Image: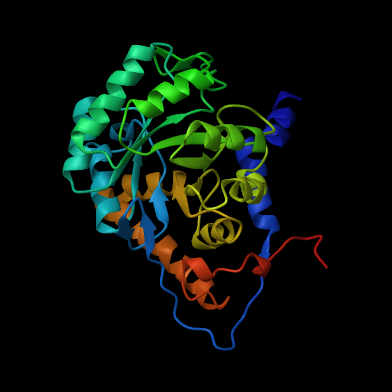
Amino acid sequence: MDNVMKRYGDSEAIAREYFDSLTIEFRMIDAVNANTEYELFGETFKTPVMSAALSRLDQVREGGAVDTARGVKNAGAVMWTGIGSEEELEAQINTGAKVIKIIKPYADIDLIYRKIEHAEKSGAFAVGMDTDFVFGPKHNKGFALEFPVSPKTSGDLCGFIKATKLPFIFKGILSEYDAVRALELGAGGIVVSHHGGSVADYALPPLRILPRIAKIAGGKIPIFLDSAVTRGADVFKALALGANAVSVGKELIKGLSADGADGVRTLINDVTEELRWTMNVTGSMDLRSIDPAVIWDKTRS
């Protein structure tokens, strides 16, 4: 019974099922080879395919955190990073990658401010917080590794935003309510995510709530999506439904494990090429021209 309940409640599996329930309409006449270039915070990248905010990559491969940054840079993409030492963050940034540092909602507020300050001084591209992690993961409730976490008030979040000149991103938004509050508080971006299913069972698929959150944002701030993304067609579906860029996590770890920085670069390039091909066959000449009407679900007639 426990195994059955776990299988049917698995948030990542539910998100994957929703991705696979959506199909894509072809538009071939007058189609052209697509341009996947992506602009974020004044910088231009080759692709909207980004790394997820991963942690403990040195356990995947020696030097894995820096190898990931190097591979992401060589793919012309944006790097996100999670839990790690100050030295690790500095080394990632020193590869030349544009690195977004995501900080856990630690119970120690001073620790959060120190990490924000260090990220800015080190040259991070942006900074943010895992707003969905305030109670910790299912397997380690109340903690992010060995550090206690705790819920954060609107006042706390305003303080973090004001503590830096960098864009401050709210990662882990999975409701219209939180999207509205994030916008009101001054978020510099929103990641629609359920943390890869690690926070709670039966979570709403991020892709399903994405169009509503994108409508709330109204183009004022960038909208990102992660969780259950494995291929370029997934990225296309997310872009069509309102995301500006999309993160890949578990598949990227496979590339890192297999071939270090080259494996990361190859994975991002391969996902980008499938995205480009999907754009080609839907008449999408660039990211701005992707039409959400090409996405069909099983109930559309």
* Colouring used for the render: rainbow
Residue 244 against residue 79 in the figure, above or below: below
Judge from the rendering whether residue 31 lies leftward or rightward of residue 293; answer left or right: left
- The mark total stands at 0
- Residue 225 position in % (x across, y down): 52, 47
Judge from the rendering whether residue 168 lies leftward or rightward of residue 164; answer left or right: right
- Residue 250 position in % (x across, y down): 45, 44
- Viewer can see residue 80: yes
Residue drawn at point x = 44 percent, y = 75 percent: 34
- Residue 152 position in % (x across, y down): 51, 18
- Residue 219 position in % (x across, y down): 52, 53
Residue 186 against residue 2 in the figure, above or below: below
Quarter of the N terminus within the rendering: top right
- Viewer can see residue 195: no
Between residues 82 and 270, which one lies in front from this camera angle? 82
Quarter of the C terminus within the rendering: bottom right
Between residues 46 and 117, which one lies in front from this camera angle? 117
Between residues 293 and 234, which one lies in front from this camera angle? 293
Residue 207 against residue 270 in the figure, above or below: above
Can you tell which quarter of the image residue 102 is in? top left
Residue drawn at point x = 30 percent, y = 56 percent: 43
Residue drawn at point x = 36 percent, y = 32 percent: 55
